[in-house]
Amino acid sequence: MDDPKVLIVEDSAEMADLLAISLQDDSIETEVAKDGAEALAMLATGGYDLMLLDLGLPDMDGLEVLARVRERRDSATLPVIIITGRERMADKVRAFDLGAADYINKPINFLDVQARIVATLQRRSKQVEATRETAETIQRTQEQLRRIGKAMDCSSDAICLLDAKRRVDYVNDAFASLFGIGLDALRVGAKFRNLFADGEQLEEVWGVCDEQGSYAGDFLMRSAGGDEIAVRCRADAILDDSRSYLGAVLILSDVRQRKRLEEDLLFLAGHDALTGLMNRRRFLEVLGGAAIEQDDEIGGVLMYLDLDHFKVVNHRLNHMAGDRFLVRFAGMLGAALREGDEAARIGGDEFAVLLRRITEEDAVNFARKLAADLGDAEFEEDGERFSCSASIGLARIRPGAGSEEVLANALAAGYHVKKAGGNGVEVSRADQRSLRELAEDSAWFFEVKEALKHNRLEVVYHPVLPLDESQPGGFEALVRMRDAKGDLIGPDRFVPAAERFGVLHRIDHFVLYTVVGHMRDHPGLRASVNFSARTLTSERLPGIVTGLLEASRVDPDRICFEITESTMIHNLELARKNMRELQAFGCRFALDDFGKGVSSLGYLRDLPVDILKIDGKFIQNLDHDAINQAMVRSINEIAHALGKKTVAEYVSDAGILAKVRELKVDYVQGWHICKPAPLEAFLERGLDSVKLPV
């Protein structure tokens, strides 16, 4: 900083000289004015950092001089120290009212005056510097805002800037287009506030930005024409270098299309795409809720229907004709329901109906009438007439009964009708439960126990390849079992029995330990492992996995755990807890068979999974099935909106692969890509040797 300059206004030349001499040691430059008029004239030249002002001047009172100094723009903030022999309190009060920095009575102590002058000059210097820095900060901020504004003009999201008084300072073209109103109109009255459907929403966004620095959330807004617009808002506070709040930037994304996709997926995930009835998973959830609500006085009944000889219809005509018949039957079934009843398609030619608050006798009569109506109905397809019948099983819904248990009872009753020739109604009794399936499962259970005991389980690997070759691929680890003769058995034959008799978790552990051992020995291997419900909901799971990976020195990012929705339903909170702990450790999760039955989109959004594996039934015939294409497209778009990757399973030919690529699914898996094989087969050629078919 240059040497400070002080103007001494004093009619006594001796006093003025003494003051000037006392300031020389501090390198303070001084000039003297002998009266008020001369002082005011000298101020016009500028450059003074402080004024020493005597009140007893020959031409005017010093207080009048001070008042004129304050009226001038060039000296309004100039520090003024009064030096006077007048001791009237009114003079001192008036001086400070006019902005005097200090007031010193004569006779004076020159060392004291010197200290006061230096202190005042130091404060003045700091104030000037602070003012300059503030001006520079404001200028930089405005320049940054202008640059940001230019960049935001190209954004597809609606963006607006609010100043510190919440006035609209800028909107981009996308904002004007989305809401049908421009910047000039928004600055009039409360038009910006009126765009928010909830009048308090703007206050909430502003308050959260002020307190926390940013805001994120979904809410409704309105266009200038009154149309509702669902938006996702991301807002950030605009701060200067000293963290002062200068305003906020709001980025508003139109999520109406995403909301529609969510609604479509919500319906498709819980309903059968062909008939529009509930699917199996959604129906079991409804059935489970009904069991909880039952009382002992009058409960409900589950009706299971298996269409007799439907395969003959498909064979004699074609599958498309069979689908049309199923749609007609679903309509017939829906028309027969009472208020409050629920119907579902739970299999290819299997249906189920929840009959609420009905006696067993009335349920039997209802079922018999439905069977008679179906038998009397004639269906025509391509000039051929045919009729159909159904094997119907009924089961009482006991209070607290599990949905799978109730369905199994009804299915067993229908099985008895089917075995007796079909076209009938049977009520489930305790002594009618089919023993055949139980006996078969028991036999497989003992095979599994022997295989575990004698180490006859094996792991094979099925490649999962990215459609974007810049991304890493991997494998799904699959379990196989050799029987006593050495024949290889697929999991579809022994896994259900292992799950039924409570040993599936032991198979899970075998696969987990085997795969991690392979990863330890082969650092390039990335793989996923399937977890059953009991494994996923074990309180010991996080400790087992983290301990195993740490001991084996395997990066947790290399392993993914595949689960199905049903594995989580047993204990949803514990499943989520375990998954989040393992994700925090670095592992990933994939939701397998997605599309079989998702209970709600909110449930999906909250699931701590990284990957959705689209159910194979939507991939099969994908290249010429419009419904499957719509399903896969919706699932893929929603998955990407939620930040999740997707995998298409069961890619069985080039046509399906081309369609999957067109729909922009992330990964593919299937026999058209490569068949499952032992790890050694891939090691011989190299883990990266499997490529997408050309």
Image (cartoon, rainbow, N blue to C red):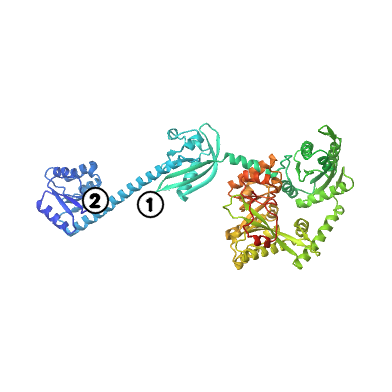
What's the residue type where badge 2 is placed?
Ala
Q: Kindly identify which numbered label has been placed on residue 123.
A: none
Whole-number angstrom distance, CA of label 1 to CA of label 2: 27 Å
Residue for point 82% across, 43% down = 311
Give the quadrant of the N terminus.
Answer: bottom left
Which class describes the residues within 10 Å of circle 2: few (<14), some (14-19), or many (20+)? some
Q: Amino acid at mark 1?
A: Ser
Which of 169 and 120 lies nearest the eye of the viewer?
169
Q: Residue 423, image x and y in percent?
A: 87, 42
Q: Which residue is mark 1?
A: 242
Please tell me whether mark 1 or mark 2 is closer to you in this view: 1
For label 2, the residue is: 101
Q: Residue at x 70, y 47 (%)?
A: 653
Q: Quadrant of residue 352?
A: top right
Q: Residues within 10 Å of mark 1 (few under 14, many from 20)?
A: few
Q: As drawn, is 369 to the left or to the right of 251?
A: right
Q: Position of residue 344 (x, y in %)?
A: 75, 43
Asked whether, in this view, residue 241 is left or right of residue 96, the answer is right
**Image coordinates for residue 397, horizontal then vertical, percent:** 79, 49
Q: Residue 190, relative to residue 130: is it above or below? A: above
